[in-house]
């Protein structure tokens, strides 16, 4: 398992709902969360080893949002 951390442009609970099914239904994502209180709207994704930052960026992009990896 690995942890991927991103800065996002997701600003509201409504936006989180828009991506919820994509992340919940993805077989390689174990757990995920978005901290709307943080200035960077941090997305944390626990995933199996084969999932990478580009995969997450593509998933987010399907709903018109963007993200960039944050350094560990």
Image (cartoon, rainbow, N blue to C red):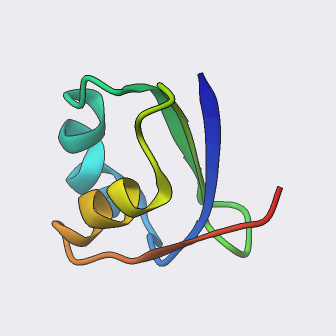
From what the image shows, is residue 16 above or below residue 46?
Answer: below
The percent coordinates of residue 21 (x first, y second) are: 19, 38
The percent coordinates of residue 59 (x first, y second) are: 26, 57
Q: Residue at x 34, y 27 (%)?
A: 28
- Residue, far front: 50
The percent coordinates of residue 2 (x first, y second) are: 63, 31
Query: Which residue is nearer to you in this view: 34 or 3?
Result: 3
Quadrant of the snapshot with the N terminus: top right
Question: Residue 26 falls in which quadrant of the image?
Answer: top left
Left or right for 31, reference 16: right
Q: Residue at x 34, y 55 (%)?
A: 55
Query: Which residue is nearer to you in this view: 19 or 50?
Result: 50
Question: Residue 68 falls in which quadrant of the image?
Answer: bottom right
From what the image shows, is residue 20 above or below residue 38?
Answer: above
Circle count: 0
- Residue, far right: 72
Quadrant of the snapshot with the C terminus: bottom right
The percent coordinates of residue 7 (x first, y second) are: 61, 70
Question: Residue 37 falls in which quadrant of the image?
Answer: bottom right
Left or right for 16, reference 8: left
Q: Residue at x 65, y 37 (%)?
A: 3
């Amino acid at each position: 398992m690995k942890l991927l951390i991103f800065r996002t442009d997701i600003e509201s609970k409504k936006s989180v709902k828009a991506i919820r099914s994509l992340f919940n239904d993805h077989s390689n994502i174990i757990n995920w969360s978005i901290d709307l209180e943080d200035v960077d709207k941090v997305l944390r994704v626990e995933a199996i080893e084969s999932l990478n930052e580009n995969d997450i960026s593509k998933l987010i992009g399907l709903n018109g949002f963007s993200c960039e990896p944050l350094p560990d």
